[in-house]
Amino acid sequence: MQSAEGWRSILENWPEAIPKQGIVVTTYQESIPFQNFLLSSGIVLLDRDKPDSLGARKVMLSYEAICAIKLTDTMELARYQVMGFQPTT
């Protein structure tokens, strides 16, 4: 699976039980905190709770530009199994 397809799949199937908040790390070496998001076929629209240094509160980013998603909540790892993550045996 291509990286962009993987990120899109994770975002499209984000479970209701997990808050839509975290930090997206981009291939541009930028960290973008978000509190919600909307999806289109090739782009994710990230909603910030505070503006960046230029005053922007929304960021449109291609799936290809996502390098990582950091999660800021303190839920147990087992709760992420609904996203397809499994423990090792």
Image: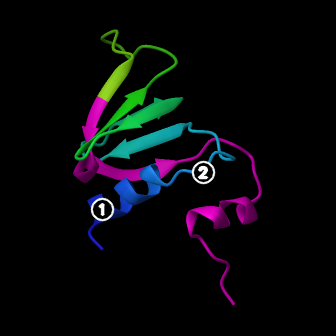
> Which residue appears at 30% of the width and 62% of the height?
5
**Residue with the most extreme bottom position:** 89
Kindly state the secondary structure of the residue where label 1 is placed.
Answer: helix
Query: Which numbered circle lies on residue 36?
Result: none
> Which residue appears at 33% of the width and 37% of the height?
30
Task: Judge left or right: residue 35 versus residue 8.
Answer: right
Residue that label 2 marks: 15
Kindly state the secondary structure of the residue where label 2 is placed.
Answer: loop
Q: CA distance from mark 2 to mark 1?
A: 18 Å
Q: Vertically, is 2 above or below 62?
A: below
Segment colored magenta: 60-89
Horizontal and vertical percent for residue 22?
54, 39
Residue that label 1 marks: 5
Marked residue nearer the N-terminal end (2 or 1): 1
Q: In which quadrant is the C terminus drawn?
A: bottom right
- Inspect the magenta stretch and tell me whether residue 6 lies in it: no
- Inspect the magenta stretch and tell me whether residue 75 lies in it: yes
Q: Vertically, is 56 above or below 37?
A: above
- Callout 2 amino acid: Pro
Task: Judge left or right: residue 60 versus residue 82.
Answer: left
- Callout 1 amino acid: Glu
Q: Vertically, is 34 above or below 89?
A: above
